[in-house]
Image (cartoon, rainbow, N blue to C red):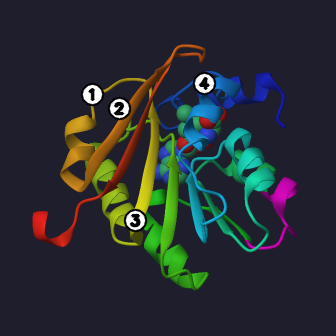
C-alpha cells in the first residue's frame, strides 16, 4: 500500500480525478462489496482502484477463475497496482480511462461483466466524460449485472438514472468524506 502521504500527494497533484484526500474506509469497502455474489461472479471490473483498498478485498473473496479488470487513469497508482497484482491469475491491470472500457474488455476477450465497482468522482469529472464512462459500463454489463457506485454526493443521480435503474442507496458515515453507496442494474431494452 502507498503511504498515506502518497495518496494525499496524488490528490494535490490531480484533485479533480483523485477526488478524495485519503483512501476509502473498511466500513465503505464492506458496504460496497456486500452486493457482490462472489460465488457467481465471472468478471468484476473496478474503475479507479487507487491504492487498491477495494482490490485487496476483491482479490481475497473472488474465486480464482473470476476475471478482475482494474482500470486506473493515474500513472502512479497504476504502477503500484502492477507491482502488487501482476502475475495473479485472471487479473488485468490497465493504465487508462474508464471511458475506454469496451476496448480493454475486447483485448482481454471478456464478453460480459457481472459487476462494476466504481468510486470515480463524477462531480469533478467533465460531464461528457462521465456520460461516456456510463455508456462503456452499460453495454458490457450482464442483464443480471450490477453497477456499484460510491459517491460523496447525490448530485449525479439523474445522470446515473439515464443509464441504469437504482436498486438501493446507503449512506456510510464512517468514511472521510462520508459516502453514498448506490447500487444499479441495467435498464431492460424495452424501457430504454
Ligand atoms: C475517490 S478515488 C478512489 C480510490 C480508491 N478506489 C479508494 O476507494 O480509496 C478515485 C480514483 O479514480 C481514479 N480515476 C479518476 N478518473 C478516472 C478515469 N476516467 N478512469 C479510471 N480511473 C479514474 C483516480 O485516479 C482515483 O484513483
**In the image shown, does 32 or 119 lie closer to the viewer?**
32
Other residues around mark 1 within 10 Å, as few (<14) / some (14–19) / many (≥20):
few
Residue that label 3 marks? 144
| Depicted 89 relative to depicted 175: above or below | below
Q: Is residue 35 magenta?
A: no
Query: Which quadrant of the view contains residue 155?
Result: top left
Q: In the rendered structure, are the residues bearing label 3 and label 1 in contact, judged by CB atoms less than 8 Å apart?
A: no
Mark 3, mark 2: which one is toward the viewer?
A: 3
Residue that label 4 marks? 12
| Depicted 116 relative to depicted 124: above or below | below
The tag earlier along the polypeptide, 3 or 4, is: 4
Mark 3, mark 4: which one is toward the viewer?
A: 3
Residue that label 1 marks? 155
Q: In the rendered structure, are the residues bearing label 2 and label 1 in contact, judged by CB atoms less than 8 Å apart?
A: yes
Instruction: Give the CA distance from mark 2 to mark 4.
Output: 17 Å
Q: Is 72 on the left-hand or right-hand side of 87? A: left
The tag earlier along the polypeptide, 3 or 1, is: 3
Q: Picture coordinates of residue 47 (x, y %)? A: 54, 52
Q: Secondary structure at mark 1?
A: loop
Mark 3, mark 1: which one is toward the viewer?
A: 3
Q: Is 91 on the left-hand or right-hand side of 1? A: left
Residue that label 2 marks? 123
Q: Secondary structure at mark 4?
A: helix
Residues in magenta, as a range = 82-90
Instruction: Give the CA distance from mark 3 to mark 4.
Output: 38 Å
Amino acid at each position: 500500500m502507498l503511504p498515506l502521504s502518497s495518496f494525499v500527494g496524488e490528490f494535490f497533484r490531480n484533485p479533480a480525478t483523485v477526488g478524495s484526500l485519503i483512501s476509502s474506509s473498511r466500513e465503505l469497502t464492506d458496504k460496497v462489496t456486500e452486493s457482490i455474489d462472489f460465488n457467481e461472479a465471472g468478471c468484476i471490473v473496478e474503475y479507479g482502484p487507487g491504492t487498491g483498498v477495494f482490490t485487496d478485498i476483491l482479490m481475497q473473496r473472488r474465486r480464482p477463475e473470476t476475471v478482475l479488470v482494474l482500470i486506473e487513469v493515474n500513472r502512479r497508482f497504476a504502477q503500484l497496482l502492477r507491482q502488487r497484482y501482476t502475475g495473479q491469475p485472471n487479473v488485468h491491470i490497465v493504465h487508462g480511462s474508464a471511458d475506454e472500457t469496451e476496448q480493454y474488455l475486447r483485448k482481454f476477450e471478456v464478453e460480459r461483466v457481472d459487476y462494476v465497482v466504481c468510486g470515480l468522482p463524477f462531480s469533478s469529472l467533465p460531464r461528457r466524460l462521465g456520460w461516456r464512462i456510463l455508456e462503456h459500463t452499460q453495454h458490457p454489463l450482464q442483464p443480471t449485472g450490477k453497477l456499484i457506485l460510491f459517491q460523496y454526493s447525490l448530485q449525479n443521480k439523474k445522470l446515473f438514472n439515464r443509464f441504469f435503474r437504482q436498486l438501493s442507496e446507503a449512506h456510510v458515515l464512517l468514511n472521510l468524506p462520508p459516502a453514498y453507496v448506490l447500487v444499479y442494474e441495467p435498464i431492460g431494452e424495452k424501457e430504454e
